Amino acid sequence: MKLSLDWLREYVALPADLDPHQLAHDLTMSTVEVEGVDDLAAGLAGVVISEVRSCERHPDADKLNVCTMHDGRTVVCGGSNVAAGMKVALALPGAVVSGRDGKPLTIAEATVRGVASSGMICSSGELGLADLFPSKGKEIMDLTHLDAAVGSPLAPAIGYDDILLEIDNKSLTNRPDLWGHLGMARELAALYDVPLSDTPAPELPSADGGFEVRIEDPRCLRYTATRVEGVDGSAASPLWLAARLAKVGQRPINLLVDLTNYVMMSVGQPSHAFDARDLPERVEIRAARDGEALTLLDGTELALDPQSLIIASHEAPTALAGVMGGDLAVRDDTSALWLEVASFDHVDVRRTARRFGLRTESSTRFEKGLDTPRVEAALGLFQDLFAKLVPGSRIVAHVDSHPRPTAPVSVSVTVPFLHGRLGRELGAPAMIGLLHRLGFCTEQDGDALEVHVPSWRATGDVDLPEDIVEEVGRLYGFEALGFSPPQVELVDPVIQPVRRMERRLREYLAFRCGLREVVTYPWVSARLLEAGGCADTPTLGLAHPPSPDMRLAPSLVPQLLSVIADNLRYTQSFGVFEVNRVFHVAPQDGPEGLPTQPKRLSAAVVGADAAALFYRLKGAVEGLSGGVQVAEVHCIADPSGAPAWADPSAVVGIACGDTVIGHLGVLSARAKRLAGIKRGEAAVLELEVEALEPHASRENRYAPLPQFPQVDFDISLVVDRGVRFTALREAALEASALVLGVHFVDEYVGAQVPDDKKSVTLRLRLGAAERTLVRDEIDQAAAAVIEQLSASFGGQVRA
Amino acid sequence: MIEQLAALEAEALAAIEAAPTAAELQQVKAAWLGKKGQLTALLKGLRDVAPAERGAIGKAANVAKQRLAAAADARKEALLDSVSAVPAGFDVTRPGTQQPSGGLHPITQLRYDLDDAFTSLGFEIYDGPEISSELYAFDSLNFPPDHPARESMDTYWLEGRDTKTGAERHCLRPHLTGGSVRYMQTHEPPFRFVYPGRVYRNETTDASHERAFFQYEALIVEKKLPFTAGRLLVKTILQAVFGRDVKVRMRAGFFPFVEPGFEIDMQCLVCEGEGCSVCKHVGWLEVMPGGPPHPEVLRAGGIDPSEWEGFYINIGLDRLVMMRYGVDDVRHFHSSDLRFLGQFQ
Ligand SMILES: [Zn+2]
């Protein structure tokens, strides 16, 4: 919303030297957010009122004229209506106007087809004044009838020596009283503790002119109809009034319509002017009937239904209550009006405006909740304006139906309550003084305060003790209240093993395993769901998903596949992980029956060598328990229920105790194809984070150092490819009690061994708890291992 | 002969010192001290010397021999000590081996910084469901029944629940505050907790709007909690996170779930309040709404508003991270683009 400082000053005696930026800051801190301060005169700097003394056709251009201006300068002008004797707006060199493309254009001394030109005679569009001075085609602004001295600046002559404040509408949603200049002036009067001049009280005739207002629906709170005769539907507004409307973004139309807009922009109360001929006997405010329609000014027809509250005359809808009038408007030959000033239920106006997609200045105000006494303020201003601007006009009849006046609101608070909430003892007199400045009345009884809320704040805005805290605090200045240390009760130390585990898990994967954390959307396409092995998993959907085939992902793998595919466009080898929730159809226990939403970890390492990637990721899983401080986690071969995205020959289960909590595997060729992964290999894992069991504290135990030396020795054996390390290890451990450990060193497949074989190198650790081994014992143990392995696996063994 | 011996010793010493490698030293040693060495040859000439002189010369020759042997040993040790493990021409200017380049998401980084600041003040960390219900997302938070945010244009409602209301109408949580009500319902005051998480809004995305974004909520409920204490809390936290003095201002703002409501601004750290492109030349950045929870919200959480007071803030993490690093497009956070994420160590 835009506010004119000049207009505000009509109602509030602001200090003369108040800097508009200071005002914007003060309003922002205590009331609403001021988004911009626009100095209109600065925008018109260098534009003066001039007169065309002579006007000759340009020697070299048919459509250009060479004009001599009031100060003797020559200006080349392409305006179609330029003529000698015309008063015009002249932009001097250095002035900035709006160019053809709307971008700023700085006027400079120029030569136009051989003729020197020192300035530009402007069209209204070039000065941003098209609303105020409508023009056709290439016409320039004709100011001949403007009562202003030639050579003087343009801005003051048209009421543009003004400052516009741009208010963020969102910050105004809870303040219906501020949707007009008078309301904001009232707020400023309180802020600066200066006087406010309210609108005059109306003095209306008691005659009803035989007119009937029939309110048949509780959604109409008040309806007044005022008959004004002796008006002229073709009259235009005086410049000052048109300028005020244009400045705040309201296009001037004709005097009668402009008056309704002016009153709305002043007191925030919408109204509607009907030609009296269109409302001959009465109006009905009622729910529309099925099949009824309302034709709008632009010709569109709204199909109404009983949800719509309408104003009807002669059984026909003439307006959508509080939102928009129909096509029966004020016309050039209008001489008498029925002026509607009414109030409607704010919820209903909001719904209607939304349903029909018609957000108007009127509905925007009504939907905030306007108080019904505001109708008087509007009528008082109307009466004043008709008297001043429409000579010969007479208010001859007035009907006021007021079934649901705004209820008085009062709030009980105590002085200690206010002190306690504010954090500072301002004292009762100071706080009462602040409330009075804002229009509240108070009754004090000891520490108790009964605060009566003014009607313009009583439509839902202020009704709680906390609201009174806010009013006092913001007018005193929140910043001025200072700081105080919170008085908190001592509580037990907060120990949250699960939270700590989650953080350690992320840090382990990032900093120990070298993976990069990603965050993906919870919704995913059908194609990725299939690639991620979720084709047959029931999924949840959104009523309005970001794109039609998106479902909520029951696994993090589908998104992970797209992360892999996307990043492969830039890089060939990388590792990523994500910790996030997935969504399952099965409901949880509890009254809401919310879907189950387990937290998962997904990770992938991407590169050229699938086997190496698999073992790298497997290493990350095997290091989890130590790195994250959780109960041991291990991998199990030949898992049941292996996911569809995994290559069946390279997949393991991830288990915590006997419970399988996830899977790790090489990404299958099919998954890669479906996910659009055209090159590279990936190992992928997914596991249930909530299945990891965090230790309450660190669980490491000290093991005494071996008292006697232990010896390592390596053996290599050539065995069938299918022989597993776990089998070799078991056999080696069984071969001799002196074998304390069997470690994997290396595996070789290639030219040095037969096609169906592999060479495996193991490192055996030998030792005894109670003595140092002698050479013979070591040799015997090694021989036993070799013999056992050869016997079990038929391999050639060499130590 | 004594003179001859001295000359020979000096020559041998020079050769030992000059030997460039252990192998050459060995040759030098053989040439002087070996069986066919020059010193040995000289000593063989003793036979021709007068017996009276023989003793003295023999002694001198032995001393010289020992001295040369010691010099050779010393030279050998020096040569071995200076052997290099790297080949000749080793290039110290080559880049070092890269460490695995993992890292946390920039949002997670800021979140953990906030966690550290809050947990040091005794706050608990809470985590709630991402699919919530209208009951918690709106009803409990004093949103009027016709509030525009309930419309599908703002909230991601789950499909097939159009006719349901309240607890049975499910949505991706539009904010975290509903989850805070869950916490209140299951905990006895006084308490203080933070609630980090991702929230969802159905809107058109651009450089400053996302459908999924991150909030960080904090709520403290105590017997007494004046505005001035809440203000100090906010300042303390921001200071802890940014590691420097941060100017904070609180101004009137309207949110249904706080009363009174505040917009909390932080002075722009890029320009120190002078105005720059990051703060859109205002000098201040809106970082969070806050204020005491609305009495209806406390009531929804099962807390008697006449007995307990609270202070609540809800930090928009995306904007704060954008300011921290000068990120110009909020959509990067969900892009999973490693060229972006890789910049945050
Ligand atoms: Zn800045």
Image (tube, coloured by chain):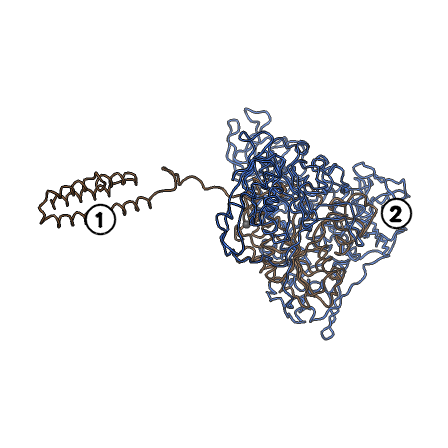
Looking at the image, which residue is at 70% across and 60% down?
B293
| Residue A130 visible to an observer of this rendering | yes
Q: Quadrant of the N terminus of chain B?
A: top left
Horizontal side, residue A107 vs residue B179: left or right: left
Q: Chain of mark 1?
A: B
Disc 1 crowd rating (10 Å Cα; few below 14, some 14-19, many 20+) is few
Q: Colour of chain A?
A: blue
Horizontal side, residue A694 vs residue A761: left or right: right
| Residue B168 locus on image (x, y percent) | 81, 50
Residue on which the image places disc 1: B66
Q: Amino acid at mark 2?
A: Ala
Up-down relation of residue A708 to residue A355 (above or below): below
Q: Amino acid at mark 1?
A: Gln
Quarter location, residue B204 = top right
Residue on which the image places disc 2: A287
Up-down relation of residue B305 to residue A111 (above or below): below
| Residue B301 locus on image (x, y percent) | 75, 60
Q: From mark 2 to mark 1, how far is it between C-alphas? A: 127 Å
Disc 2 crowd rating (10 Å Cα; few below 14, some 14-19, many 20+) is many
